[in-house]
Amino acid sequence: MVLSREDLLGSGRSCRWETLMKRRAVDIQRDYDRLLSMQRLNWQINFPRQVFFEPSFRFQLASGAKRGEVFVYEQECALVGWLWLDLGRPGVDHIRHIQVERAHWGKGIGRRIMEDAIGLYIGRK
């Protein structure tokens, strides 16, 4: 799916983005190192006194990917963020994780990923 400027910002709003953002299913082989780096930073910020256990992250991420619950977002061929949904419980819509690459913080990408996640859930109903 390609999100247009209007999809991203709504018509009539000013645009901070010069290019489109694209969602695709995660490819563990291709994307894992980037997601791991982002997750390590996220863990340090949110759980500073807890140890990050990489094997658990890898296993859970791979399981979510096999179920079609993990997506990455690219802009100009660069990974700018990712989304992890929980689709396992009927009637329960849960966003497990949204993360934006640090270089792109404050640009509205996280909000756009959230809006896309909501759209994915609405599309399932």
Image (cartoon, rainbow, N blue to C red):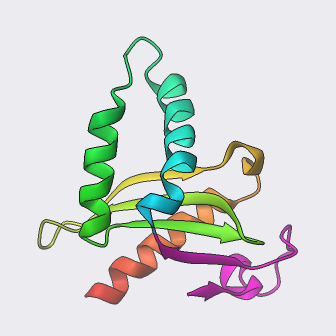
Report the span colored magenta. Answer: 1-25
Q: Is residue 117 left or right of residue 101?
A: left
Corner quadrant of residue 53: top left
- Position of residue 84 measured from the top left corner of the image (x, y, whole percent): 38, 59
Q: Which residue is at 77% across, 87% downward?
A: 11
Q: Is residue 11 left or right of residue 2?
A: right
- Position of residue 103 measured from the top left corner of the image (x, y, whole percent): 77, 46
Corner quadrant of residue 37: top right
Corner quadrant of residue 47: top left
Q: Which residue is at 73% across, 87% downward?
A: 6
Q: Is residue 113 left or right of residue 118?
A: right
Outermost left residue: 90
- Position of residue 115 measured from the top left corner of the image (x, y, whole percent): 53, 71
Looking at the picture, does residue 86 appear above or below residue 101? Answer: below
Q: Which residue is at 44% across, 71% downward?
A: 117
**Quadrant, the N terminus:** bottom right
Q: Is residue 115 left or right of residue 103?
A: left
Outermost front residue: 29
Callout count:
0
**Quadrant, the C terminus:** bottom left
Is residue 12 covered in magenta?
yes
Is residue 78 covered in magenta?
no
- Position of residue 67 measured from the top left corner of the image (x, y, whole percent): 24, 70
Q: Say which of 19 and 113 sits in front.
A: 19
Q: Which residue is at 63% across, 78% downward?
A: 22
Q: Say which of 5 and 99 sits in front.
A: 99
